[in-house]
Image (cartoon, grey):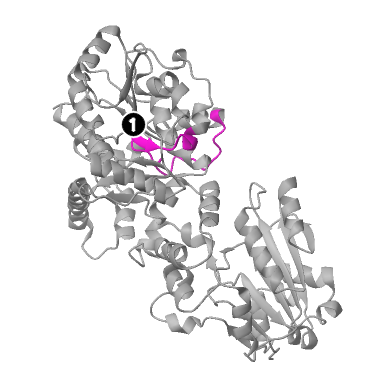
Amino acid sequence: MKIGKENVKRYSVYRFYDKDGIADEYVITFLKALKNVSSCLQVVVCGRIGHGDLERLEAVSDQVVYQSQQEDMTALFLKTVKNVGSEKLKTYDEVILCEDAFYGPVYPLTGMFGTMADRDVDFWSVLDAGTPSFLVLRKSVFEKAVLSGDRIQDESVCSTLQEYLKKQGFAFGEYISVKAFAGYTDDPFRDFPRYLVEEEKCPIIRKDIFRVDYGDVLAVSSGDSARDVLDYMEGELDYDVTLIWKNLLRTCNMADIKKRMQLNYVLSARFPKKRKNTIKKIALTMHIYYEDQAEMCRAYAENMPEGTDVFITVPTEQKKKNVEQVFQNFPYKTEIRVIGNRGRDVGAFLTAVKDVVFNYDLVCKMHDKKVTQVTPMSLGASWAYKCFENMLKNKTYVENIIATFEEEPLLGMLEPPIPNHGPYYPITGKGEWGENFPLTQEWAQKLGIHVDITEEKEPAASLGAMFWFRPQALKAIFDYDWEYEDYPEEPIDDDATLLHAIERLYPFCSQWEGYYPAWVMADSFARIELDNWEFLNREFVKAEMKKFGDDLSFRELVGEVSKLSPEGIKVGE
């Protein structure tokens, strides 16, 4: 059945669900576009909805109705028939059934509907990949079919509305043919989103491509798909990708976002970027405890740009005298504050310089680092090197960090990658949390940081507690009235203290404030890091393959290793 391209009457139903009852701006944007191609737009709200968000939905639709729980497309259709009436539906040329499973549209929906108007079909979807979340039914479905709810929902007959209609002999069509991807993928939305958008002019992208487990992604690709389509949209299309970022930051775990969006920056230490000069006021905060580290701290601090204000904290008057001597004739305005020996770099940051942090557009937080609980001390020195080189390598590199913040308005923090040498290697497993998850979760609640924090997924934290940041990205932490008495007295435990919890909370706070944290490396250090990770991975895989064979996939190898007891014998043998 063709319907022509002019004066088409469409009844659209959009099902909305959000666990927090929030209708983000991407929803409103999609509904406005859907309303432009619809004669009547109904929004079905599943679960709760905030009062202000309800008003926003009502403002862009003709009717808002409620249902207590999420249901599939079949149930949505049957309720539409019941609520509207089959006779009234016959007065429409098309009925659109969709849900909030997409971002977009990145092109006007009129283009897709215009293309499909020439197709002689009774119903169609954007892409027939599993159960479609955007289904369009034409008048012939209502004129010819006797639609029985019992028949549709009887799994012995069919499992979906689409399958039911096919069994009834109705002609089905797709805006994009799934046959074109045969042999390449069983999920084009997941694996080829840029191709769908750029070449096939698909107006929508599925939300879950930014949420799918990264192991599943690597099982079928190199992991490039989500970031690739987002970069294309940002560079070539009018759609505001900030709408996607804001929804992801509010609803997803930061570890998942970091991996799917590859939140890693490798910046040149030789070739400067062109600055936009939108970031004017810059500060460096630096806590110095070890007197023999002061000269090293000064050398790196000199890489800050002209006009930087420097705030140095020290625990005693005697240490202040030493630091003053080392920082004689320092080229930037410098203030040295004596704060006592409680709270370490955390107290120095959250309490001692709280009064000045929000006077600046961008701040670099640093502290000296000499790990004394591990030997040889080269281990701790290498960690310090990793932090300082990737934060303050040289003047060109620092300018490139600032330029990156200017280019990326939602970038909240830049951190060095986690250590992976010597005894720090287990940090890539349990070590990111150590014994700190319960305390981190407790303090997140106290500070009003309500994002997805789970022990099963690593915190996106540097664990060296040195980073560049926008002050607004850490507002929730700074809003707390931190006193020195809040911090543990020396000597503190090696783990599971408030200081360790806050170290892991920084990136979650950035996420809560609507900014993303990311890793950053100088290009000179990235050469080291790539070889480190390649070597560690290769050696581990060689040992696994020696035990389990060399024909297993990554997922299969992980599964075999997880079955081993600490003694190396498979459980159950």
Q: Disc 1 residue type?
A: Thr
| Left or right of 228 in this view: 94 | right
Percent x, y of residue 119: 62, 90
Magenta stretch prevailing secondary structure: loop
Is residue 557 among what the camera can see? Answer: yes
Residue sitting at 46 percent across and 48 percent down? Answer: 409
Q: Mark 1 points at which residue?
A: 308
Residue in view at x 51 percent, y 61 percent: 208
Which residue is most to the top? 318
| The quarter of the displayed image where residue 153 is located | bottom right
Say whether residue 457 is magenta: yes
**Quarter where residue 155 is shown:** bottom right
Above or below, comparing residue 462 to residue 349 in the picture: below
Nearest to the observer: residue 275 or residue 338:
275
**Front in this rendered view, residue 223 or 314:** 314
Number of residues whose C-alpha sits closer than 10 Å to that of mark 1, classed few (under 14), some (14–19) or many (20 or more): many
Q: Does residue 390 appear left or right of residue 338 in this picture?
A: left
Q: In the image, is residue 57 above or below residue 515? A: below
- Judged from the image, the secondary structure of the residue bearing numbered disc 1 is loop
**Foreground pick, 198 / 66:** 198
Instruction: Tell me the magenta residue range.
Output: 447-474
Q: Which quarter of the image is occupied by the N terminus? A: bottom right
